[in-house]
Image: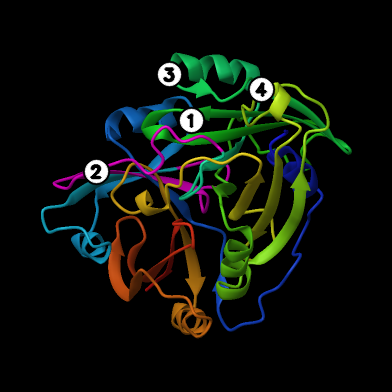
């Protein structure tokens, strides 16, 4: 079965402007950053700075008040590094955190794409995907399949899923034809983070949580099947690839193609459930963090919608952002999502 990212990219690249509009007094922007909990901050920073060529924009220590808000003991501390794409440094950033003074497990230990719970991956545009694959191998990443070539309507793309440090998965997408409408003003290989996928067991419940309770806007809903046996981005045996169906929902704060999330529910392939592991400080893709205008109004709205925050609205300090109001929620299957407003 072809992983839906290729279909997504074919459709997303047709999108220009707003599909849906939020009519409330609050406004959720594309996610400012995705947070990784890592075991070796220095080595991980070197990979993203030297291989992906992102720029370090902040380095420091996490606010103790934030760690307390997450329910961590007073003994806990964390060092962090924020990296940004030179193309779009204002959002889609990556924050790396290394925790000390507290027991740290893994969010998705040895996880396969059909295992549910937490956040599965991040998605990046790329160029030269085959050379990239060789480079990633040299840095300890391994492919969940070889690069897969797709023709989706008018769009021709390659996709590669790789797993590396801390059991983290990255999906790299290279668009071949037609060319991107607005290429970055430099010879680039990687853009900012534009999407993050979750593998869910209860599709309807997860959809209701994001669209109806949190108020995100749907972009795409479809079911994906593989028409003939063969190599597939999910790493399924060839003879099973036609038997597994994947129901997919793609959405974002405003229906645009930035700061997206993706729900994927598979019929015919089941595995472990890692939902209970998806909490700080466990290693892996820890959370997505969204800026909000009028966070007080948004907080009141989701409470009325039946959402029970895992971190109540409060003031804390986030290194490169400064003093913020923030709160956090967890999806029905464990994904940790934070919302903040700079003060």
Q: How far apart are marks 4 and 1 (CA)?
A: 21 Å
For label 2, count other residues whose C-alpha is less than 10 Å away and answer few (under 14), some (14-19) or many (20+): some
Q: Distance between the residues labelled 2 and 3?
A: 24 Å
**Which residue matches tag 2?**
104
Image-based side of 81 in relation to 162, left or right: left
The colour scheme used here is: rainbow
Q: Residue at x 38, y 30 (%)?
A: 165
N-terminal-most mark, 1 or 3: 1
Q: How far apart are labels 2 and 1 at the CA level?
A: 28 Å
Q: State the residue position of label 1.
A: 53
Q: How many residues crowd mark 4 within 10 Å: few (<14), some (14–19), many (20+)?
A: many
**Which circle marks residue 139 in the picture?**
3
Q: What stretch is highlighted in magenta?
A: 84-113
Q: How crowded is mark 3: few (under 14 residues within 10 Å), some or many (20 or more)?
A: few
* Mark sitting earlier along the chain (4/1): 1
Relative to 331, residue 247 above or below: above
Q: Identify the residue under disc 4.
A: 147
C-alpha span from label 2 to label 4: 33 Å
Mark 4 or mark 1: which is in front?
4
Q: Which of marks 2 and 3 is nearer the N terminus?
A: 2
How would you classify the magenta stretch by its main secondary structure?
loop
Q: Position of residue 252 (x, y in %)?
A: 63, 60
| Mark 1 and mark 3 residues within 8 Å of each other at the beta carbon | no
User: Residue 267 falls in which quadrant of the image?
Assistant: top right
Front-most of 272 and 110? 272
- Quarter that holds the C terminus: bottom left
Q: Residue furthest right?
A: 154
Of the residues under marks 3 and 4, which one precedes in the sequence?
3
């Amino acid at each position: 079965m072809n992983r839906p990212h290729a279909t997504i990219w074919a459709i997303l690249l047709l999108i220009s402007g707003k599909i849906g509009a939020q009519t409330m007094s609050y406004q959720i922007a594309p996610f400012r950053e995705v947070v990784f909990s890592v075991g070796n901050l220095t080595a991980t920073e070197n990979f993203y700075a030297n291989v992906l060529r992102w720029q370090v924009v902040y380095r420091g220590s996490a606010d103790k008040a934030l760690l307390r808000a997450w329910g961590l003991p007073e003994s806990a501390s964390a060092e962090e590094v924020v990296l940004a794409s030179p193309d779009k440094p204002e959002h889609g950033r990556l924050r790396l955190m290394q925790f000390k003074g507290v027991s740290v497990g893994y969010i998705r230990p040895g996880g396969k794409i059909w295992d549910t719970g937490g956040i599965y991956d991040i998605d990046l545009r790329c160029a030269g995907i085959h050379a990239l694959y060789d480079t990633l191998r040299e840095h300890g990443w391994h492919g969940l399949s070889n690069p897969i070539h797709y023709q989706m309507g008018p769009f021709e793309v390659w996709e590669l899923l790789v797993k590396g440090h801390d059991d983290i998965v990255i999906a790299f997408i290279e668009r071949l034809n037609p060319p991107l409408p607005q290429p970055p003003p430099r010879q680039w290989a990687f853009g900012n983070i534009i999407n993050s996928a979750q593998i869910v067991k209860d599709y309807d419940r997860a959809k209701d949580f994001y669209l109806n309770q949190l108020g995100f806007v749907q972009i795409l809903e479809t079911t994906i099947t593989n028409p003939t046996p063969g190599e597939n981005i999910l790493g399924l045996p060839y003879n099973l690839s036609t038997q597994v169906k994947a129901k997919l929902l793609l959405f974002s704060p405003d229906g645009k193609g930035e700061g997206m999330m993706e729900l994927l529910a598979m019929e015919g392939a089941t595995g472990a459930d890692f939902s209970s592991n998806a909490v700080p400080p466990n290693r892996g893709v820890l959370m997505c963090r969204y800026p909000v205008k009028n966070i007080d109004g948004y907080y009141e709205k989701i409470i009325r919608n039946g959402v029970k925050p895992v971190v109540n609205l409060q003031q804390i300090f986030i290194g490169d952002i400064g003093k913020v109001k923030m709160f956090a929620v967890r999806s029905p299957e464990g994904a940790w999502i934070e919302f903040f407003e700079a003060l």
